[in-house]
Amino acid sequence: MKKYTISGCTACDSCRWVCPGEAITMDADGAHIDPEKCIGCGKCVNECPSEAIIEVK
């Protein structure tokens, strides 16, 4: 299963709404992905306008 991390988030909040696993939360520092909830679908990657969400290799 693919895993993702976030670096350089601009806190636009777009990714949170497309996540079917509700794995993304927002706080003052931007978006965060809960690896326990992430299903690896990649919808957040496609939605992120700042390309801050990247696949962990």
Image (cartoon, rainbow, N blue to C red):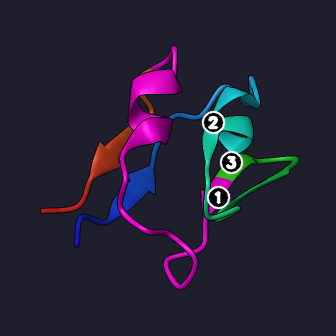
| Residue 27 point in image, percent of width and height | 86, 52
Determine which quarter of the picture holds residue 2. bottom left
The numbered disc on residue 31 is 3
Residue positioned 74% across, 23% down in the render: 12
- CB-based contact (under 8 Å), mark 2 and mark 3: yes
**Alpha carbon separation for disc pair 1 and 2:** 10 Å
Specify the farthest residue to the front: 20
Other residues around mark 2 within 10 Å, as few (<14) / some (14–19) / many (≥20)? many
Residue positioned 74% across, 38% down in the render: 17
Residue positioned 23% across, 61% down in the render: 56
| Amino acid type indicated by mark 2 | Cys
User: What secondary structure is the magenta-colored segment mainly?
Assistant: loop
- Magenta residues span 32-50
| Amino acid type indicated by mark 3 | Ala
| Residue 46 point in image, percent of width and height | 40, 26
| Residue 44 point in image, percent of width and height | 50, 39
- CB-based contact (under 8 Å), mark 3 and mark 1: yes
Name the residue tied to disc 1.
Answer: 32
Other residues around mark 1 within 10 Å, as few (<14) / some (14–19) / many (≥20)? many
